[in-house]
Image (tube, helix red, strand yellow):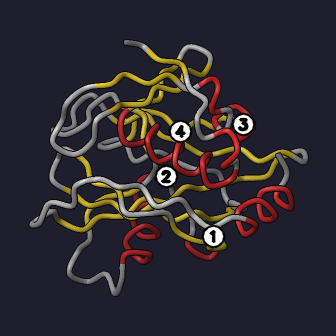
Amino acid sequence: MTRDEFLHRFFLHNAPIVQRPTPKRLRPAAVLIPLWERDGELHVILTLRSAKLRHHANQISFPGGRQEPADKNLYETALREAHEEIGLDPGDVELVGQLQDYPVISNFMVRPYVAFVNPSAPLKAQEREVAEIFTVPMHHVMQQREHFVYRLQRFLYDQVYFIPYQHRNIWGATAGILRELADHLYPEHRPLFRSLN
C-alpha cells in the first residue's frame, strides 16, 4: 500500500462507529499510528514495551501515553510521547486524521492519531519504556481475513484481536485499533476474521 492509496481509501469512507461501553472516569491518553513510506510501501512503526513496565509490559504498542497537564491537546500528547519513546521529531510528523477513542483496561481512554512520518534522524528507543522499535508492512496488518478474534465477556469489549506477524503477536488494544483502521479503509471486508473460539 502506498501513501496515495492510503489517503484515497482513508478519505473515501466514513469512519465506522463502533458501539461499546463508555465508562466515566477514564483518564485521557493518546497514541500515534506512525506510517512510514519506504521503497514505495507504507509501514507502521510499532514498539515492544519494556518488561520492566507496570502496565502492558512486553506488549506491542504504538508510541503514546497519558495526557500531561502541560499538553495543550491530545495530539500534542501523542507527539510528545512519540518523541520521548522513539525519538521521533514532531516536525517530521504529518497528521492525517484520528480514529474513534479506544478504552483500555488500564483505565485510559486512548485517542489514536494517524500520521505520515519521515524521520530526519534514526529512531532511538527510550530504554526505560521501549525494548525495541520495529516496522510492519501496512498491507499485512490491513488484511482482515488474517486477523484472529477471541470472543469473551469483558467490561469494555466482547472480543480481542490478534494479528500475527513473523515471530510476533500483535494483540489487545494495538490490534483492536489496527482492526478499526482496517475496517475504515476496507469496509467491504469488515465481516472477515478467523475465530479462535
Q: Residues within 10 Å of mark 4 (few under 14, many from 20)?
A: many
The image quarter containing residue 57 is top left
Q: For the residues marked 1 and 4, what is the alpha-carbon distance in whole angstroms?
A: 17 Å
Say whether residue 121 is left or right of residue 155. right
Residue type pointed to by label 2: Ile
The image quarter containing residue 4 is bottom right
Q: Position of residue 69 (x, y in %)?
A: 20, 81
- Label 2 or label 1, whichever lies nearer to me, is 1
Which residue corresponds to mark 1?
Answer: 93
Secondary element under disc 3, as helix, strand or loop, is strand
Residue 137's disc number: 3
Residue 133's disc number: 4
Circles 4 and 2, Cβ within 8 Å, touching? The answer is yes
Q: Nearer the viewer, residue 22 or 163?
A: 22
Quarter that holds the C terminus: top left
Q: For the residues marked 3 and 2, what is the alpha-carbon distance in whole angstroms?
A: 18 Å
Residue type pointed to by label 1: Val
Q: Residues within 10 Å of mark 3 (few under 14, many from 20)?
A: some
Which residue corresponds to mark 2?
Answer: 86
Who's the residue at 84% across and 45% down the image? 41
- Label 3 or label 2, whichever lies nearer to me, is 3
Number of marks in the rendered image:
4
Q: Which circle's residue, 4 or 2, is located before the other in the chain?
A: 2
Q: Nearer the viewer, residue 136 or 144?
A: 144
Who's the residue at 26% across and 36% down the image? 56
Circles 3 and 1, Cβ within 8 Å, touching? The answer is no
